[in-house]
Amino acid sequence: MSFAPLFRVDLRRLIVMLAILSGLITLSISFYASYQVQRESLIDSTLEANRAYAVKLAVGAETFFGSVQQQLRYSTAILAEQFDDETMRREIERLRLQTNSLNSVVVTDAQGMVRAVSPNNSRLIGHKLTSPGAQEALRERRPLISSPYVSALGTLVVLISQPIVDKGGTYLGYIGGVISLKEPNILSSMLGEHFYQDGSYLYAVDQNRRLLYHPDPKRLGTLVQENAVIDRVISGESGSQLVVNSLGHDMLAGFAAVPTARWGIVAQRPTAATLHPLDDLMLEVLRQTTPLALLTFIGVWWLSGLISRPLWQLAKSAGGMDAPTSAERIQRIRSWYFEATQLKRAMQVGINLLHQRIGKLNLDAQTDPLTGLHNRRGLTLALEALSADGHSFAVIALDIDHFKRINDNYGHDAGDQVIRHLAQLMTACSRDADTLCRSGGEEFLMLLPNTNIESALQVAERLRHCVEQEQIPPVGHLTISLGIAVWPIHADNIERVLKLADGALYLAKQHGRNRSEVAELDRDPAEDFNRDD
């Protein structure tokens, strides 16, 4: 009676449930991995697009300011020869109407009194300008782009001024072009119009964190606090970054500086808007997958009958063990059981293949695509493994001498070719147990397990001589500088050892390049370690 419940178990349904569960788990893993890869790709591409757009607008603004300054310089040359009211009136009228770059133009004398203004405003003629931009232009007497300030009319403006000096060197005054940040002009057309309809927008800030252009007119002239992107762009940086804006929304921002005006341009897009197409894509993948999943379920249900049948036969044969033909029947059923085992192994092979694909993805994430060496992630994992192993290892930090000249003289493609060639030489001069990394640009690291200082120096010198003698097209011969440190001889802390090796590399640079330097010890080493070359 105790065996009766066993015969009520439906093995066919158990197999189907197991197959469905395995399929769902595999499908979920695939969906999750695909979603994460696509998500990172979308974020990276959006950040790069916003950075490129911000750089493009920053270059355009820089070109605009340069063009206005050039026009003003031309006008000062004319006014320096004929500093009379009629010449001033004609020249500033031409400047204002010629290109729509300036909202107004003014000429003052050396005391700051207005001599001419366009559009014509008789009330200003003969009056002294006291605005911050005017006072700065009088005081400095050099070409200037003022910080944005509120004019007497209550508008936010920028004054671009050029001093007027006659042939004898006498300062006559200045000519200034006024750009209103709230009125139409070329600059507002360039920065104030953003045609994307996906939630993206653009804004500009000055050195004081004041908003100069923004899609919300109410925010113009306000100050922005606690924004990491603005911190970076007003310090002159260009790049991209994930940031939370003042409304608490996650944004993907690209930014670039305008050096002449000391402005910053920021283009950003909501993260949610960037990832919205990915949600639709995953739903479409799910819709495409559903019919195939149903067909798979039907096939699994049919195959489960074939798989479960010999198991039922084996269970039924258990009651007839004393029959003459039971051994033969069980022998035949055992062949089916063997097939079931093979099926389980086939599933295991399938899982192993999945792990291999994931392992390949991990390998790609740890490998520098240009050289095939480890990247920073691979370096971190290698250091963790060496630290866990507990054996000593040497660190050789190296980079290419005068690499910038190679890029400048031969182009970046030649620079990439040199980097690949150096990676091949490093591989040829190292052991299989050594870890070779490209840490960035023309900088490399070599991790040599079970290697003392003398052996590490020999490896470094061998590589240096090999590079020095190598003819690398199209640049010819080049040299490298190397810095060496050994853990735990130089320091107990691995990060400290890396810094010591890097410091030794810079010491080699200071001593003339094309040489190897060993870092000074942080403490007395307890023992040396031998390298098995």
Image (cartoon, rainbow, N blue to C red):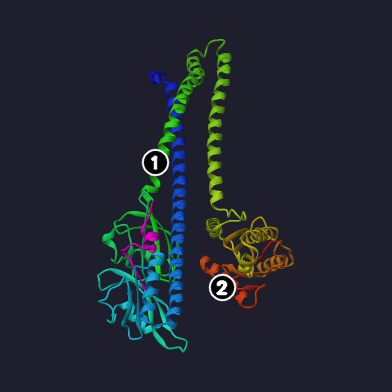
Farthest front residue? 86
Say which amino acid is labelled 1: Asp
Magenta extent: 177-195
Q: Any magenta on residue 152? A: no
- Residue underneath mark 2: 503
Residue 183 in which image quadrant: bottom left
* Residue 80 x, y percent position in the rendering: 43, 82
- At 60% across and 71% down in the image, what residue appears? 505
Task: Determine the secondary structure under disc 2.
Answer: helix
Q: Nearer the viewer, mark 2 or mark 1?
A: 1
Local SS, label 1: helix
> If you read the primary sequence from the N terminus, does the residue marked by circle 2 or circle 1 appear first?
1
Q: Is 523 situated left or right of 199 in this image?
A: right
Which residue corresponds to mark 1?
279
Residue 458 location in percent, x, y?
69, 68
Name the residue nearer the viewer: 70 or 409. 70
**Residue type at tag 2:** Gly
Q: Position of residue 308 (x, y in %)?
A: 48, 20
